[in-house]
Amino acid sequence: MDTPTPPSRWQRWRSHLLTVALVLAVFLGVQAWQTRAVPAVLDLNQPVQWLGADGSSHSGSLAQALVAARLVQPQTPARGRWRSTSGLSGAPSAAAWRAA
């Protein structure tokens, strides 16, 4: 009986590279499809619903939900967190959160 010859090293690497490329293409395609209708800037006044830490249901604006998720009031800095005082970080200022 003749034993089949195993694939060469190059054939195995090519097969592995094609598999990785296929997985990467599918991953990037799904990611692009999921983000196709996401606006570049989120509207912080859009209505949302969220669950509180105690399981209670809340509704309000996106800005209110973000404040609730941080578990601190925007006026008081959280202990141990770095906060930018220059305003160049891109995050809204405390005054903007108070106005929302």
Image: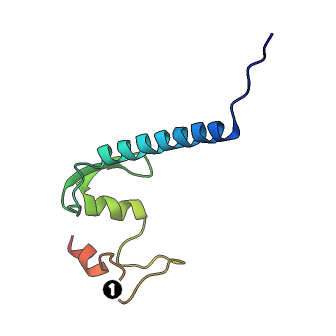
Q: Is residue 53 left or right of residue 20?
A: left
Residue at x 34%, y 84% (from the top left corner): 88
**Camera-nearest residue between 29 and 86:** 29
Q: Amino acid at mark 1?
A: Gly
Residue at x 31%, y 79% (from the top left corner): 94
Residue situated furthest front in the rendering = 2
Residue 10 drawn at (x, y percent) = 65, 41
> Which quarter of the figure is the N terminus placed in?
top right
Q: Is residue 10 left or right of residue 91?
A: right
**Camera-nearest residue between 8 and 50:** 8
Within 10 angstroms of label 1, few (less than 14), some, or many (20 or more) residues? few
Residue 99 drawn at (x, y percent) = 20, 75
> Which quarter of the figure is the C terminus placed in?
bottom left
Q: Quadrant of residue 62?
A: bottom left
Instruction: Relative to 11, say whether 58 is above or below.
Output: below
Q: Secondary structure at mark 1?
A: loop
Instruction: Relative to 10, say whether 100 is above or below.
Output: below
User: Which residue has dot 1 on it?
Assistant: 87
**Camera-nearest residue between 19 and 84:** 19
Residue situated furthest top in the rendering = 1
Residue 71 drawn at (x, y percent) = 43, 64
